[in-house]
Image: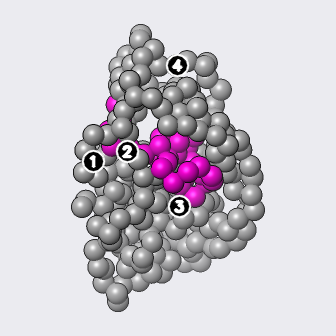
């Protein structure tokens, strides 16, 4: 099985904001079809709408909730087991839209779709939880300013490659790997090209981080046990480090939901 982190990087990069959303008009998709995936092979797809057309294939409800509310998996509390086991296909259309839809508008429309079709009701809580703070190490950063035009992130077990990326993007990826909110306090501005290599440990980049249930085939390939931990790699390769502390974490608590009737 191809590990899921290689297929969700664009979506994961959107998780750099908190639960607070920009105010937008309450617009909904004009038509939407929600169906259980007939045959699942683990190759899922979730993209922002183009020209008003939104398509999601082989996704879990938890994935959709995470995208709609810009939260990580560990920020979603409550709900039955099927939110990360059942897979869904969605086709939706918003009339009069051209080009790529703004993220804030798409998130508002996706929340409306989940409320309508899954009867989703949530509330927001702030809990004191362990977090990491991303800081510059004492000898300074080891990052090269980007000279390229394309922006992207590639993730493989034990390797993160960033092109024209910010330290905020790095913090978002580290949140996925560590299962904690990582707060960027480096004070570094600009876009950088860099790579991080470490000995991936069990649980890092696990399916749960992407709203999936784990199965035996999701076991990551073995890595070099002699390689550095992600904490050591950050300091030695990028001149950054993470400090553990307690801090307020915004949580999304599921109060109610139902399986939709297919149509």
Q: Which residues are magenta?
A: 55-83
Q: Which image quarter is the C terminus in?
A: top left
SS at mark 2 in the image: loop
SS at mark 1 in the image: loop
Mark positioned earlier in the residue sequence (3 or 2): 2
Mark positioned earlier in the residue sequence (4 or 1): 4
Q: CA distance from mark 4 to mark 2?
A: 23 Å
Mark positioned earlier in the residue sequence (1 or 3): 1
**What residue is shown at x 27% (from left), y 40% (from top)?**
38
* Rendered location of residue 79, percent (x, y): 59, 49
SS at mark 4 in the image: loop
* Camera-side residue of 119 and 142: 119
Circle 1/circle 3 CB separation < 8 Å: no
SS at mark 3 in the image: helix
Say which quarter of the image contains residue 59: top left
Q: Which residue is mark 3?
A: 175
Q: Which residue is mark 1?
A: 40
Mark positioned earlier in the residue sequence (4 or 2): 4
């Amino acid at each position: 099985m191809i590990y899921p982190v290689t297929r969700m990087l664009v979506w994961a990069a959107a998780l750099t904001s908190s639960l607070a959303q920009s105010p937008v008009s309450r617009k909904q998709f004009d038509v939407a079809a929600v169906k259980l995936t007939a045959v699942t092979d683990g190759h899922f797809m979730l993209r922002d709408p183009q020209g008003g057309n939104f398509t999601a294939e082989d996704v879990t409800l938890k994935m959709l909730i995470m995208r709609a509310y810009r939260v990580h998996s560990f920020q979603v509390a409550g709900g039955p087991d099927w939110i990360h086991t059942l897979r869904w296909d969605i086709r939706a259309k918003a009339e009069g839209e051209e080009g790529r839809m703004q993220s804030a508008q798409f998130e508002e429309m996706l929340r409306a779709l989940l409320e309508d079709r899954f009867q989703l009701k949530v509330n927001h809580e702030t809990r004191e939880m362990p977090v990491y703070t991303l800081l510059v190490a004492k000898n300074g950063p080891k990052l090269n300013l980007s000279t390229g035009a394309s922006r992207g992130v590639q993730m493989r077990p034990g390797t993160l490659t960033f092109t024209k990326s910010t330290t905020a993007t790095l913090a978002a990826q580290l949140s996925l790997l560590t299962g904690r909110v990582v707060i960027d306090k480096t004070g570094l501005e600009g876009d950088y090209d860099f790579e991080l290599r470490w000995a991936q440990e069990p649980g890092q980049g696990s399916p749960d981080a992407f709203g999936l249930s784990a199965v035996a085939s999701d076991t990551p390939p073995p890595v070099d046990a002699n390689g550095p931990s992600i904490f050591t790699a950050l300091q030695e390769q990028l001149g950054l480090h993470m400090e553990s502390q307690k801090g307020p974490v915004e949580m999304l608590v599921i109060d109610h939901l139902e399986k939709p009737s297919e149509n």
